[in-house]
Image: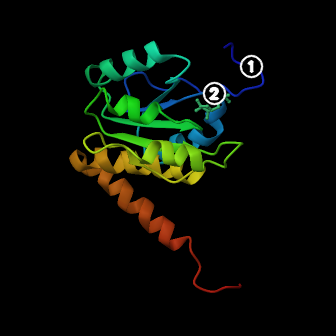
Amino acid sequence: MAPSSMEPTPPAGDATAPVAIIMGSRSDWPTMKAATDSLDRLGVAWSARVVSAHRTPDRMVAFAREAREKGIQVIIAGAGGAAHLPGMVASMTSLPVLGVPVQSKALSGLDSLLSIVQMPGGVPVGTLAIGEAGAKNAGILAAQILALNDPVLAGRLDAFREALTESVPETVED
Ligand code: RP5
């Protein structure tokens, strides 16, 4: 299916990045951009591409099989509706896969959530919240995984948490 010129185009990002963000459709990009915002804030490079479990199955298989040798360390996969992309990618790689349920028009993303979260034992997908909050947290969680072996990044995460705490006023009114 040719992409509509009205749909936003995900930028490719950095092909050598440790975090790969994939999504089932260009229509997922407004949601998945929140993951890149988190990663940018934490100084973590990312790549982004459209990989559909249903419309581009060969692209999905090639991506999953080649991900580790390309230097990818964490995969963030967003999809909506019959959201099989995160689970199928997880079935073909032992890299950690974080699944983001994109809010669907028909069922508000509950379909996406259930499609992603109900993985059979043995093939985990770390499933985040529906929509932008889930994508935002997927970016942070990917950084936290990388920070296990990166003290500088761990320091940035600590600073991020401190700034988050400081941004919450204790009083209900000024
Ligand atoms: C899924 O179908 C995509 O992840 C997207 O969330 C949903 C709808 O895709 P489009 O019809 O907008 O391309 O595969």
Instruction: Say which quarter of the image contains residue 122.
Output: top left
- For disc 1, does the CB lie below 8 Å from ligand 1? no
Q: Is mark 2 within 8 Å of ligand 1?
A: yes
Check disc 1 and report the residue beneath it. 4
Identify the amino acid type marked 2: Arg
* Side of 97 where 26 appears, left or right: right
Task: Please state which of residues 75 and 139 is positioned toward the viewer in this rendering.
Answer: 75
11 lies left or right of 72? right
> 139 and 171: which one is in front?
139
Q: Residue at x 34, y 33 (%)?
A: 90
Q: Position of residue 96 (x, y in %)?
A: 31, 39
Dividing the picture into quarters, in which one does residue 15 lie?
A: top left
The residue singled out by tag 2 in the image is 26
Q: Amino acid at mark 1?
A: Ser
Judged from the image, the secondary structure of the residue bearing numbered disc 1 is loop
Is the image coloured rainbow, by chain, by secondary structure, or in one colour?
A: rainbow
- In this view of the protein, which residue sits in the foreground, 87 or 95? 87
In the displayed structure, 80 sits above or below 162; it is: above
Judge the density around disc 2: few (<14), some (14-19), many (≥20) Cα neighbours within 10 Å: some
The x, y position of residue 55, in whole percent, is 56, 18
Quadrant containing the C terminus is: bottom right
Which residue is painted at 43% across and 20% down in the image?
60
Residue 87 sits in which quadrant? top left
Given contact means CB atoms under 8 Å apart, are the residues at marks 1 and 2 in contact? yes
Question: Measured from the top left, where is residue 104 in percent x and y?
Answer: 66, 42
Residue sitting at x 26%, y 20%:
69
